[in-house]
């Protein structure tokens, strides 16, 4: 429910206080120090449910649970525990506008309380000398270790806030209910007042110090009656009669009280049991107001304008219903005691109550400030009264801020209009850019298609040309049978028949070069022969062309040979024409039966290439090592070219096609 039920019950209590103009409270709200978001949550709850009340001031209750938080990993050191409590207060005091809810909430906080079970044994204070950031163990720090670091942060924070004219805080821890006397010593040194303090009765010197320092002690007899000691054993009446500044208060009224007015219940029982008179009850009530954390305006309204003095001049009997004699008695007794100590020791002691001369100076200063309508810092929260000049100045500032706000509103409207126009223009520009990109893309695709078509046509022509060249090269280099006739053999009537396998073994460069050299030598020899050797020259030249088709050097040699001898060109032409007629005149069946086939390829299949033999009077041919005819002599046969191993991919030889030049 996010604290809604607790808020509703508390607001019902505030409603009851409105009918009682003499009852005021200081309720407690806890801050555990587990993280720095607790203040934010608490201020949100306070502001959301409207928990501000004229009859109430809030006290922040800090439990001593560092060890519990450390064991559960909430904090890593005692310094982090302290920072979680005070760092948000420093931040909002420095920059109130950053968190206005928290700033509004802490203006309704009167002080800090430090609580926990005092019966828990403490680590000796002289051992606990670590700095807060060095205290990283799970061991609980001593009571006075907590007290000192709480006081140090509250004191420095108050000094900073007082300079900025913000509200300040008191430090009123709960100590002296149980536990050792060390707790009361820490309260005496550091606190503005303490709660409970019943164990103070066991140490008379410490009571005397509390009396001299005017440290307040707030006692809750009905609560102590249940938890600590009986009502009749409570030391409150002894403290009061000895002159200590004591007051009555309630503690957990829903648990220990039985009426709707628990504070009135405390006063009535105390007056009857301890036989306290009306003047005693009024003095106790006056001490309660002085020890409370309410602001200066509240105290002036309840006690009088000069409440900050110490003598009877500070008492306004019409408001406190306390006799001046009782106030004068307390004043004279205190100064007599201090004077006796100074006389015995020969030293000057600081005094908690003002002397008469000091009171006169303070009173004159206060009256002068009242004439000038200025407030004098008297401690606590100061509420300065506004002056007419200040109100006029604020009105002028308000009008100026309104004009600035109107100008800023107009500027904002104009900027919004310009922003809208720019957005529309930007959308139009983006649409145009998209259209332009689409048009550019389409034109690029069109150009690309044209380029690809032209490239395709070029590639087709190049491929066709390469096919033609390849067919011619294979015709000359692989399938044409060249007959080489030596001069001696021609003269003597002998013939030399060879099978040119340069086309099949084109990869063997050494063999090809040897064949080219031999053929060139034959061409040079055949050029010088007579007309009777024309046929031999023709076939030698043709064989040279077949061998040269696989390389540039061979092509150059062929061109040189054909170009240098016109008779040779005519002879080659005649031989090619005869070869063409002879090749195309034969049928496929006759070729298959009459000529052997040279198969290429793998086991998957092969395509055969067959060319008819060329028959002349000067030379005969043989295939695959066949013996020549009778009556003809054979020259030395060249070595068989190396055979290539079969590949997985079939090598298919296309049919020989003559170029247009020779058709």
Image: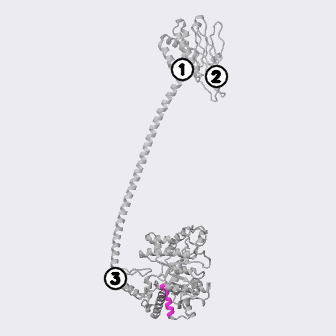
- Residue depicted at x 52% and y 94%: 277
Nearer to the camera, 636 or 402: 636
Q: Nearer the viewer, residue 570 or 250?
A: 250
Magenta extent: 279-290
Q: Secondary structure at mark 1?
A: loop
Q: Residues within 10 Å of mark 2 (few under 14, many from 20)?
A: few
The answer to whether marks 3 and 1 mark residues whose Cβ atoms lie closer than 8 Å is no
Q: Please give the name of the residue rendered at 52% of the width and 25% of the height, measured from the top-left corner.
A: 466
Which residue is labeled 3 in the image? 372
Q: Quadrant of residue 579?
A: top right
In the image, residue 654 lies in the stretch drawn in magenta: no
Binning the other alpha carbons within 10 Å of mark 1 as few (below 14), some (14 to 19) or many (20 upward) gives many
- Contact, CB < 8 Å: mark 2 with mark 1? no
Q: Earlier in the sequence, mark 3 or mark 1?
A: 3
Question: Looking at the rendering, which quadrant does residue 638 occupy?
Answer: top right
Residue 434 locus on image (x, y percent): 43, 48
Image quadrant in which the N terminus is located: bottom right
Location of residue 37 in the rendering, given as x and y in whole percent from the top left corner: 52, 69
Tell me if 123 is positioned left or right of 530 in this view. Answer: right
Q: Residue at x 53, y 91 (%)?
A: 241
Residue at position x 64%, y 28% in the image: 647
* Dot 2: element: loop
How far across and how far down the image is residue 325, in percent?
Answer: 46, 94
Q: Nearer the viewer, mark 2 or mark 1?
A: 2
Residue at image mark 2: 643
Residue that label 1 marks: 549
Q: Secondary structure at mark 3?
A: loop
């Amino acid at each position: 429910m996010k604290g809604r039920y607790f808020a509703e019950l508390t607001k019902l209590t505030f409603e009851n206080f409105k009918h009682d103009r003499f009852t005021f409270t200081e309720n407690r709200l806890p801050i555990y120090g587990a993280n720095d978001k607790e203040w934010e949550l608490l201020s949100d709850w306070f502001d959301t449910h409207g928990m501000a009340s004229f009859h109430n001031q809030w006290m922040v209750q800090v439990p001593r649970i560092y060890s519990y938080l450390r064991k559960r990993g909430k904090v890593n050191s005692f310094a982090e525990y302290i920072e979680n409590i005070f760092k948000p207060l420093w931040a909002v005091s420095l920059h109130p506008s950053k968190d206005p809810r928290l700033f509004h909430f802490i203006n309704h906080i009167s002080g800090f309380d430090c609580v926990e079970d005092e019966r828990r044994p403490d680590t000796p204070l002289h051992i606990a000398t670590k700095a807060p950031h060095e205290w990283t163990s799970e061991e609980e720090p001593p009571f006075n270790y907590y007290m000192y670091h709480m006081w140090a942060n509250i004191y420095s924070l108050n000094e900073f806030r007082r300079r900025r004219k913000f509200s300040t805080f008191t430090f009123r821890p709960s100590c002296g209910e149980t536990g050792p006397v060390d707790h009361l010593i820490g309260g005496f040194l550091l606190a503005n007042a303490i709660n409970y303090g019943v164990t103070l009765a066991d140490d008379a010197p410490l009571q005397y110090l509390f009396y001299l320092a005017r440290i307040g002690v707030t006692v809750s007899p009905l609560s102590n009656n249940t938890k600590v000691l009986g009502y009749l054993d409570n030391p409150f009446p002894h403290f009061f009669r000895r002159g200590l500044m004591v007051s009555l208060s309630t503690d957990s009224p829903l648990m220990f009280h039985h009426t709707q007015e628990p504070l009135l219940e405390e006063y009535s029982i105390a007056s009857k049991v301890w036989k306290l008179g009306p003047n005693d009850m009024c003095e106790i009530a006056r001490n309660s107001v002085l020890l409370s954390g309410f602001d200066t305006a509240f105290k002036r309204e309840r006690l009088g304008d000069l409440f900050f003095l110490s003598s009877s001049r500070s008492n306004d009997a019409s408001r406190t219903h306390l006799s001046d004699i009782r106030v004068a008695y307390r004043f004279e007794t205190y100064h007599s005691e201090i004077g006796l100590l100074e006389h015995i020791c020969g030293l000057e002691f600081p005094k908690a109550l003002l002397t008469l001369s000091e009171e006169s100076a303070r009173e004159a200063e206060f009256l002068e400030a009242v004439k000038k309508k200025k407030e004098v810092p008297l401690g606590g929260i100061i509420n300065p009264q506004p002056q007419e000049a200040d109100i006029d100045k604020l009105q002028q500032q308000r009008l100026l801020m309104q004009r600035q706000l109107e100008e800023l509103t107009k500027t904002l409207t104009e900027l919004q209009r310009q922003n809208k126009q720019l957005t529309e223009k930007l959308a139009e520009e983006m649409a145009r850019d998209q259209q332009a990109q689409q048009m550019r893309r389409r034109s690029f695709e069109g150009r690309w298609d044209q380029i690809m078509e032209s490239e395709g046509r070029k590639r087709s022509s190049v491929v066709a040309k390469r096919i033609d060249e390849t067919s011619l090269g294979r015709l000359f280099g692989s399938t044409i049978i060249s007959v080489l006739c030596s001069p001696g053999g021609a003269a003597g009537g002998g013939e030399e028949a060879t099978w040119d396998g340069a086309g099949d073994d084109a990869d063997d460069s050494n063999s090809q070069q040897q064949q080219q050299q031999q053929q060139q030598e034959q061409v040079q020899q055949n050029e010088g022969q007579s007309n009777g050797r024309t046929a031999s020259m023709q076939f030698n030249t043709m064989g040279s062309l077949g061998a040269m088709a696989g390389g540039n050097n061979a092509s150059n040699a062929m061109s040189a040979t054909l170009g240098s001898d016109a008779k040779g060109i005519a002879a080659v032409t005649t031989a090619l024409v005869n070869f063409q007629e002879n090749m195309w005149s034969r049928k496929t069946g006759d070729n298959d039966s009459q000529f052997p086939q040279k198969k290429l390829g793998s086991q998957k299949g092969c395509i055969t290439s067959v060319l008819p033999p060329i028959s002349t009077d000067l030379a005969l041919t043989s295939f695959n090592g066949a013996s020549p005819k009778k009556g003809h002599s054979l020259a030395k046969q060249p070595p068989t070219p190396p055979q290539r191993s079969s590949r997985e991919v079939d090598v298919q030889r296309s049919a020989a096609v003559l170029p247009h030049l020779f058709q």
